[in-house]
Image: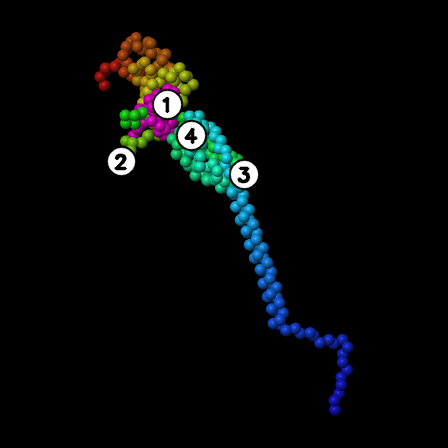
Amino acid sequence: MAVKAPAEKNFRRAKVRPTARRGGRIAAWLTWRIGRWVVGALVVLYVGYRGGHLVLHASSLQVRRISVHGNVRLSSDAVRAIVEGLRGTSILTADLAGYRRRLMESPWIADAAIRRVLPSTVEVFVSERRPMGLCRLGSALYLIDPRGVVIDEFGPQYAEFDLPIIDGLVRSPNSGQPTIDETRAELASRVIDALAPRKDLAQRVSQIDVRDAHDAVVLLDNDAALLHLGEDKFLERVQSYVDLAPALKQRVPEIDYVDLRFDERVYVRPAGARK
């Protein structure tokens, strides 16, 4: 006998959807979202590339003017000639470091700096070497700076320089080319700098010998006496000799050398005296 149970009014049968169909819709949605992101990224990259390309090649950002500062001996045109390759290039990508290295190859340039000034100017700042004297290398004379750097061979183009000849700078190595001894160059530089405030004395110095790195020997114009100055008090000792010279020459008409290294005593060696 069949019995019918009353149906529960609050009971509802759950609606079950096929799992495979729901998963397919999610996968399609994810694919669509990823596709949109990839396309968007490609568009951004392309726009950035094109924008960068246009900026880098914009005529308004090409180097049109090169200004030079700090030069004295070198002309501005000579400096510009070294970095002329910058002209017409993009100011944003110009190889400033490479052109600075080219500037540093010039024997007259001790240091250099280059900077960009937007939109189209490059500024070049140079610091030139200061010749302190003439160094003998073989049979020729060369301009040399206080650090012992050889600048250029001395010739008529440098006639405006009134510089002393500095002997004893060159040392012969066991192999290779002769080199400049920096310690001796520094001694010569200190002599020149010490006398510089007294132009009347500085202009009388015709030769400096630094073969002994602890004793600078100076020769004055129109005076055959070699002045041994040691390694300090150069101005005081040269002035001392100038003050004493008339009296010394009365007693010793021909002087080989005067040793001024012992401040309270002056030793005079007559020319032709036995060693």
The amino acid type, in three-letter code, at marker 1 is: Tyr
* Occupied quadrant, residue 108: top left
The amino acid type, in three-letter code, at marker 2 is: Ser
Looking at the rendering, the stretch of residues picked out in magenta corresponds to: 143-171
Comparing labels 2 and 1, the label whose residue is closer to the camera: 1
Which numbered disc covers residue 124? Answer: none
Q: Is residue 149 magenta?
A: yes
Q: Which of marks 1 and 2 precedes in the sequence?
A: 1
* Occupied quadrant, residue 233: top left
The amino acid type, in three-letter code, at marker 3 is: Ser
Q: Secondary structure at mark 3?
A: helix
Which numbered disc covers residue 158? Answer: 1
Above or below — where is 98 with respect to 191?
below
Residue ID at (59%, 58%) = 36
Q: Which of marks 4 and 1 precedes in the sequence?
A: 4
Q: Secondary structure at mark 2?
A: loop
Between 64 and 125, the residue placed more toward the observer is 64
Q: Secondary structure at mark 4?
A: helix
Distance of mark 2 from mark 4, alpha carbons?
A: 36 Å
Distance of mark 1 from mark 4, alpha carbons?
A: 17 Å
Classify 10 Å Cα crowding around label 3: few (below 14), some (14-19), many (20 and above).
some
User: Which residue, given by chain and number where applicable, does mark 4 sit on?
Assistant: 78
Q: Which quarter shows the C terminus?
A: top left
Whether residue 123 sits left or right of residue 34 in the image: it is left
Whole-percent x, y for residue 138 in the image: 28, 27
Color scheme of the displayed model = rainbow
The amino acid type, in three-letter code, at marker 4 is: Ala
User: Which residue, given by chain and number where applicable, does mark 3 sit on?
Assistant: 60
User: Which residue, given by chain and number where applicable, does mark 2 sit on?
Assistant: 175
Distance of mark 1 from mark 3, alpha carbons?
A: 42 Å
